[in-house]
Amino acid sequence: MATARQRLLKEFREAQKAKADDTGITLIPSETNLFAWRAILRGPKDTPFEGGNFELIINVPEQYPLQPPSVRYRTRIFHPNIHFKTGEICLDILKNAWSPAWTLHSVCQAVLALMSAPAPDSPLNCDAGNLLRFGDIRGYNSLARMYTLDFAQAKIAGMT
């Protein structure tokens, strides 16, 4: 646990220096628990998520960085690799491809990359996956945009 705490303190210091304007990522640790974080991701440009702010809940295990954090969306999103109800994210680095070299910031970068390049062949949201698999890009983009406008446009507490 001491190793995890030291690593998280280092990541906290780095997060304080980072500018969200540059990366689209704001990491916010809990005031009372260094193992509980939030992240605000700015929707990537040229995607149906552009203009949205998406909140992630990050729970870090005591074995971090040897084990991956648990990351899920708090903001509803229409995406094939994100479970609509639970916010669970289907991303290999959060499961079997984890490496201690990953940081909370780099995990958020990977989630942003997934938003830009969905993988419809391993969907947690079958409706979104089916639209993309069957080539209905317009339908997918329309629904993803509607969800962004409905759920990701609100002011998120703690954002500067």
Image: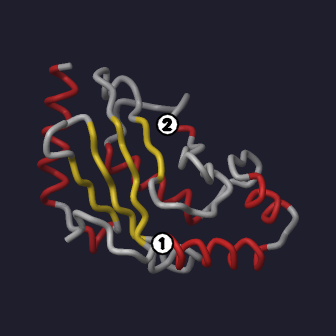
- Locate residue 88: give its quadrant: top right
Amino acid type, label 2: Leu
On-image quarter of the N terminus: top left
- Locate residue 145: give its quadrant: bottom right
Image position of 108 with respect to 48: above or below = above
In percent of width and height, residue 127 lies at 77, 58
In percent of width and height, residue 57 lies at 38, 47
Q: Callout 1: few (<14), some (14-19), or many (20+) C-alpha neighbours within 10 Å?
A: some
SS at mark 1?
Answer: loop
On-image quarter of the C terminus: bottom left
Which residue appears at 57% of the width and 66% of the height?
Answer: 116
From the viewer's side, name the closer residue of 105 and 82: 82
Amino acid type, label 1: Pro
Which residue appears at 53% of the width and 79% of the height?
Answer: 149
In percent of width and height, residue 6 lies at 14, 30
Image position of 52 with respect to 5: above or below = below
**Earlier-in-chain disc, 1 versus 2:** 1
In percent of width and height, residue 53 lies at 40, 70
The furthest residue to the right:
134
Which residue appears at 59% of the width and 76% of the height?
Answer: 48
SS at mark 2?
Answer: helix
Horizontal side of 160 relative to 116 (left or right) equals left
Report the residue marked by disc 1. 44
Which residue appears at 69% of the width and 79% of the height?
Answer: 142
Give the Cα distance between marks 1 and 2: 21 Å
Q: Callout 2: few (<14), some (14-19), or many (20+) C-alpha neighbours within 10 Å?
A: some
Report the residue marked by disc 2. 94
